[in-house]
Amino acid sequence: MSQPQAQQRYFWLPVPDESSSYGLVRHAFAGTRLDAGTADEAFCGNTFALANPSEMDWIHAKTCQDCNTLLKEMKGWPR
């Protein structure tokens, strides 16, 4: 019988990131949004200021591929 995977809580949030032409990128952060402060370290290892994004920010901000890949690896998903 296989072992159940440990539950990892995380949330995605568009944050200011100079690597994007739009100025925001969706990064993944550990925990819950309610527990987060004004800045936090994303799964990709970079620290970002956290703010309340608009609906347009969610639509236009690209996803951080490093965060996405790391989360997939944690869940045992193939790349």
Image (tube, grey):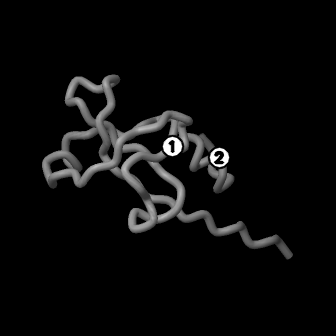
Q: Residue at x 56, y 35 (%)?
A: 45
69 lies left or right of 19: right
| Residue ID for mark 1 | 41
User: What residue is at 34 percent from the left and 48 percent from the top?
Assistant: 50
Q: Nearer the viewer, residue 27 or 41?
A: 41
Name the residue: 68% across, 53% down.
76
Where in the figure is residue 33, as x and y percent of width and height?
40, 63
Q: Is residue 76 left or right of residue 29?
A: right
| Number of numbered markers | 2
Which residue corresponds to mark 2?
A: 73
Q: Residues within 10 Å of mark 1 (few under 14, many from 20)?
A: some
**Viewer-proximal residue among 66 and 40:** 40
Residue 75 % position (x, y): 64, 56
Q: The C terminus lies in which quarter of the figure?
A: top right
Image coordinates for residue 34, horizontal then vertical, percent: 39, 68
Up/down of 17 relative to 61, above or below: above
Residue 53 lies left or right of residue 5; in this view the side is: left
Q: Are marks 2 and 1 in contact (CB under 8 Å)?
A: no
Q: Amino acid at mark 2?
A: Glu
- Residue 73 horizontal/vertical position (percent): 65, 46
The amino acid pointed to by label 1 is: Glu
**Residue 70 versus residue 52 in the image, above or below:** above
Front residue of 29 and 65: 29
Quadrant location of residue 69?
Answer: top right
Q: At 59% from the left edge and 43% from the top edge, which residue is drawn?
A: 70
Give the residue furthest to the right: 1
